[in-house]
Image: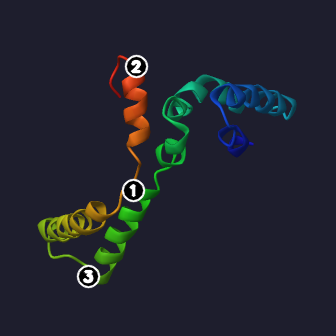
Amino acid sequence: MLKAIYAQKSKRAARERVKLVVAELMEMKLQEAARKIEAGIEKTLSYCEFPREHWTRNRTNNVIERLNREVRRRTRVVGAFPDGNSALILVCARLCHVAGTRWDNKKYMNMSHLEAVQENTSWII
């Protein structure tokens, strides 16, 4: 049900879908869930304020999840660390490596879309 809300093509369509989902939850006697969705939907639809090309990048946290998997993979190899500082050193070294190699070479978002929006408005994103 919730995926249907975020699959909409506009913020207005997502709000209309919320009304349908809330009505469906009320019919299923899930009033508390319906209230929570109504109360928090505007916060979760904030990504719609950005250009459509950025929506999937803004509403997901795939980059953070991938980074966490990389750190977990490296720390699992070691098993038990002698102290907290050695674990911190390993994690920081891995983050520096990832930041220095992958993030410099790959563009995560095409910022020209935001520059076009910024030129048409008086506020800065």
Residue 87 point in image, percent of width and height:
19, 69
Quarter of image, res 3: top right
* Closer to viewer: mark 3 or mark 2: 2
In what quadrant of the picture does the C terminus appear? top left
What residue did someone put label 3 on?
A: 78
Q: Is residue 35 above or below residue 99?
A: above
What amino acid is labelled 1 in the image?
A: Ile
**Badge 3 vs badge 2, beta-carbon distance below 8 Å:** no
Q: Is residue 25 above or below residue 120?
A: below
In what quadrant of the picture does the N terminus appear? top right
Q: Residue at x 40, y 68 (%)?
A: 69
Disc number placed over residue 107 in the picture, else none:
none
Q: Earlier in the sequence, mark 3 or mark 2?
A: 3
What residue did someone put label 1 on?
A: 64
Q: Residue at x 63, y 28 (%)?
A: 11
What residue did someone put label 2 on?
A: 121
Q: Earlier in the sequence, mark 3 or mark 1?
A: 1
Crowd tier of the residue under label 2, counting other residues whose Cα lies within 10 Å: few below 14, some 14–19, many 20 or above: few
What amino acid is labelled 2 in the image?
A: Thr
Looking at this rendering, what residue extends furthest in the right direction?
A: 27
**Badge 3 vs badge 1, beta-carbon distance below 8 Å:** no
* Closer to viewer: mark 2 or mark 1: 2
Q: Residue at x 60, y 23 (%)?
A: 39
What amino acid is labelled 3 in the image?
A: Val
Closer to us: 50 or 110: 110
Residue 30 seen in the current view: no
Question: In the figure, is residue 12 to the left or right of 48?
Answer: right
Crowd tier of the residue under label 1, counting other residues whose Cα lies within 10 Å: few below 14, some 14–19, many 20 or above: few
Label 1 element class:
helix
Quarter of image, res 22: top right
